[in-house]
Image (tube, coloured by chain):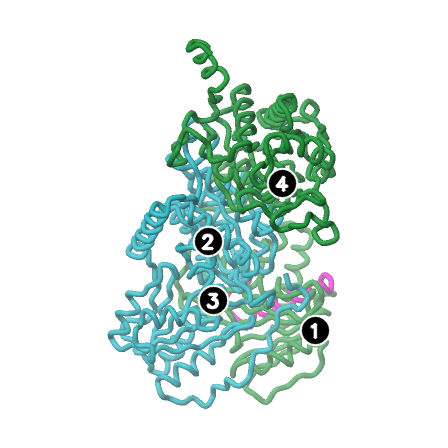
Amino acid sequence: MSNQMVKGNTAVVIGAMYAGCDCFFGYPITPASEILHEASKYFPMVGRNFVQAESEEASINMVYGASGTGHRVMTSSSGPGISLMQEGFTFLAGAELPAVIVDIMRAGPGLGNIGPEQGDYNQIVHGGGHGNYKNIVLAPNSVQEMCDLTMKAFELADKWRNPVVVLADGTLGQMAEPLVFPEKAIEPKSDDSWAVKGNKETMDNLITSIFNDFNDLEDFNFKLQEKYAEIEASEVIVDEYEVDDADIVLVSFGISSRIARTAVDKAREKGLKVGLLRPITLSPFPTERIKELSDKGVSFISVEMSNGQLLRDVQFAALRREDTHLVNRMGGNLIELKHVLAKIYEIAGIEDENLDTSKRSEEKASPNIID
Amino acid sequence: MSEENNKDYVEQIRRNPQSLLEEYPRKGTNIQSTHYCAGCGHGIIHKLIAECMDELGIQERCVMISPVGCSVYAYFYFNCGNFQTAHGRAPAVATGISRAEDNAIVMSYQGDGDLASIGLNETLQAANRGEKIAVFFVNNTVYGMTGGQMAPTTLIGEKTVTCQTGRDPDYAGHPTHMCELINTLKAPVFIERVSLANPLKIRLAKFAIKQALTVQKEGKGYSFVEILSPCPTNLKQDVKSAQAFIENQMEKEFPVKNFRNNLYKKEPVQRPASDFSTESLDKIFNVNRTKGSGYIDEDIEPLRIKVSGFGGQGVLSAGLTIAQAACAEGKHVSWYPSYGPEQRGGKSNCSVVISNETIGTPVVDDIDILIALNKPSLDQFSQDVKEGGVILYDAKIGEFSTDRDVKVIAMPCVDIAEEHGNARTANTALIGALTELSDVLKRESYENAIKEMFASKPKVIDVNIDVLEAGAEWIKNNQ
């Protein structure tokens, strides 16, 4: 087999390069730095552009500039750096520029620590910058998907002229799994109808987010909302595992969904009808599918490493709020199988004396690296 | 003026250069006049830049960046590719454009608040990288668009709406000298400060702008022109006092001169073309497409291994060798490290899961095989080994026993390693034992994994393969 053991962060760079990404701009931050390292190594090997920016604000604005020339471009960071980039997100959305941003989430708020968490959900899925815009958000849960969804992100960014975020976490970035390489590399074609390239064909084009006339800006906002509605109608991707006959459905993405999947297997061994619904697109969110399952009487458990940020979207879709539940960890702790199982058993009304959820795991990330 | 003369006047003097539009449809209303106030310097600077673009024959290659400030609408006027950007970020945006399109001539047009306050970092960093951009810095000592607030370049004693009794250096610092700051950096090719105080100085300003754009035309690097410019509206001046203010006060604080001109000394900066071919990528990532890819479907029980010890004992690389072997056999496998300062001697462990189907959690907390290289990790993880599992540990740790149904093997892995190679390969001796304890993976696969892991250090390969074999022999003889 020619599969290669590859770390998640490296897989991002592989996916980007086979997708025809021409420019990488980034600033160091744990646990996303390896993406920067690998990009600095591989991009110049094939004559592509790499710049270590002076800050995340600069990175995202370099992305804005390079994207405006019609090239495929990206940056990557983690929570604190992503917060700094929010200005750039809204400018990209406002100028309708395609760009790919990879967020390898760490634990917050503030500097927090470098352990894995999913607390960037709200700032990425529900905006974070000013104005009525949305990102498209893809959530990989394996090294293979770190590569494949990064490729997909470039395709969607170009198709919708919108920023696309690959939302992963420290664990996915650090772990290694076999990677089946993309079948072939994409040679990107830029669109001269809007890009500004410094040539005769594109000299009448303008990249801007300014609309001086209030009505023009309102119309543009409505146009954006129509675009988001079309994206919602056509781009939802969800991975379902044992959902069809399930009474209890776990909703989870990223590394949490890997643990949730094992929980489904364990619960099924006990004869419980449990399934996993994994949104691969967090924006657009699989609202319709959750509503449909809710109407069938399914109970939902949001399995997440944040304070119920995913749960709120599940509740919005499920309508029956009382039948949505949360099992979560924060602070850099991975969610543990036993906690997920305990919640499933609680809802199913059965007891398992062997489950001891009182003890917290002792794994710690280093206190020596904080940024 | 006769009608004939008037026509000549309109065509030759009033006519815009080709690089400025004749009318300004992007403005929406009053498309024959600019949005600038009477007496403002921006109109003059726009015209000077556009004349230079015409004269150098670079109009089609030009990309103008409009900042946030009074010149936020520079794109109404310039007849070339245009970008409008966030406040202060123009040099970063310019960097992106220039790196992506090597042939583009990128101009960043910024005021004092944008360039010297909110965008100071981007300004200095782009200059320090020697980006191929021309920066036109319009210094009028005041924020214009937001209504006359103090700027970084406001003079001591000068009154603005946010320093109403005059700028007091004890509270608001001193004027920022951008040419002088940028002149401390090595990379910039051209740095000059000019003034719009009178027609002669305007001619000299044009000469500096043309030099700055010539640097770009020839692809030589970074050029910076600071232009002392009037803002009669916010500084509440008439024509005469605006001119006097520039000449008598601004020019005293900000000397008008050339700081650097390396136009004729500097070699052009060439950037390579991007290669998007599959072949080139396959080469740099060592992709071998003849071997096929994907997963082989076979019936195996999932195997969960934890390798643990101190950082520096090769804990993570041992786990990765096992994972690599599984990967080469087309099995599903995950390797998950507890990440931290391995190199600093802290505790370190990794989980390896091998399966014939999609792996759920990559974290191993019911362990089939625990490989422990130190006592703390043996104590910590031994209780997580499931019934029927195996604990394989470095015999140097000392006695260890458990009353659970777990096979406990103390292996003199350091001795074996020293005998067949060196002590640093003790982790490989343990993997050797693993090849006999579990038949999930072939010995050959481990050997190949070692070859791959140490591809850059071929000397180490043979030693490790010897130790791997010795480890396997030991376990055969001591079970």
Amino acid type for the residue under numbered disc 3: Ile
Numbered tag placed on residue A147 in the rendering: 2
Q: What chain letter is assigned to the residue under label 1? A: B
- At a point 65% along the width and 50% down the height, the residue shown is B163
Amino acid type for the residue under numbered disc 2: Cys
Q: Colour of chain B?
A: green
**Region in magenta:** B420-443
- Please give the letter of the chain rendered in cyan: A
| Label 2: few (<14), some (14–19) or many (≥20) C-alpha neighbours in 10 Å | many
Mark 4 highlights which residue? B126
Question: Residue B451 appears in which quarter of the rendering?
Answer: bottom right
Image quadrant occupied by the C terminus of chain B: bottom right
Q: Are marks 1 and 4 on the same chain?
A: yes
**Label 3 vs label 4: CA separation?**
38 Å
**Label 1 vs label 4: CA separation?**
58 Å
Dot 3: element: helix
**Label 2 vs label 3: CA separation?**
15 Å
Amino acid type for the residue under numbered disc 1: Pro
Q: Are marks 2 and 1 on the same chain?
A: no
Mark 1 highlights which residue? B412
Question: How many numbered circles are shown?
Answer: 4
